[in-house]
Image: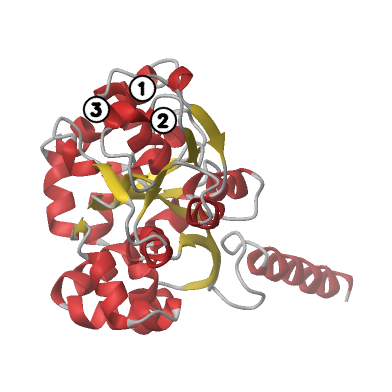
Amino acid sequence: MKRLLAAVAAASLLLLTACGSSDDNSTSGSSTVKVNFGYIGDYNGSSLLAVADDQKLWAKHGLEVSTKVFTNGPLQITAINAGDLDFGYIGPGAIWLPQSGKAKIVALNSLGNADRVIAQPGITDLAQLKGKKVGVPEGTSGDMILTLALKKAGLTNDDIQRVPMDASTIVAAFASGQIDVAGIWYPLLNNIKQKKPGLVELAKDSDFTDNSFPTAFVGGNNVSADKITKVVQVLREAMDYRAANPDKTVELVAALLKQPVDAVKADAANSQMLDSKTLDGYTADGTINKWLTGLGDYFVGAKKITSNPDPNTYYLGDTFTGAASK
């Protein structure tokens, strides 16, 4: 009898151990893995999430997602490092954060042309920025486009009255005339134009042809490889659906963001969306590394980072391309 009881106890212990060995953050009694995902409420930042939800891609790959909207990329990386998010979306102006080791890029998303330096009516040239009060969301693509524009005009941050503020605050501050100039992006710029239709666009991404401005999805440094692969599989499928169904994707984003379809369509036109096959090719031939190295050179010059790291240390290109066969 003692031997029988010992055998039963050992079997019970083995069963409990097996039940406790499921993936991190999995739901109790299920193999579904929980994922906390941040995004920005524009077409670039939300289109793949809208598609993944509509096409049930999360469940297909054994994921249960919880999403939260943010106003910029740096806030999401702060949340990732605080343990509140697993993944997030960033614009090109926040690429310096994974370059400084704060996160890993798990997938690229698009090439942006949504960033602008805008000015109050009467300011018609970049040279006139000298002495002006300029609102800028620190560490974002608004910061990046402003810095590039100042350099083009032969100016520096010391030549302006730089006012750090959140992107959403810039909308009200510019509309009320509290600031003269701003580094900002679409679709927030549409909100400003409704209140200040005479504003002047002094600079945009496409003015700087020596640079490419990729947007990206990032993951925390401590997120498991299995979870990253599952998320990348979702993103890849969503990218290809978006490429094949652009009008439907616009409708899905409009529903998610509760915005008019025409406004979302106009926002989408500001960027070049990338699909998985294109990104596989750009990963293999070094194009993505070239983009990231170019941005790294800019961020070193802008004093966001002290040295330009090898993109292979923070872009998980092998994981992205490898997810195609799984």
Residue beneath the point at 58% across and 48% down: 80
Q: Mark 2 points at which residue?
A: 99
Give the percent coordinates (x, y) of residue 196: 39, 60
Upstream in the sequence, badge 3 or badge 1? 3
Q: What element carries label 3?
A: helix
Q: Mark 1 points at which residue?
A: 309
Q: Is mark 2 on a helix, strand or loop?
A: helix
Give the percent coordinates (x, y) of residue 307: 39, 16
Residue beneath the point at 22% across and 72% down: 242
Q: Is residue 28 above or below residue 175?
A: below
Q: Which amino acid does label 3 sit on?
A: Gly
Upstream in the sequence, badge 2 or badge 1? 2
Residue beneath the point at 45% across and 31% down: 132
Q: How crowded is mark 2: few (under 14 residues within 10 Å), some or many (20 or more)?
A: many
Q: Nearer the viewer, mark 3 or mark 1?
A: 3
The quarter of the picture where the N terminus appears is: bottom right
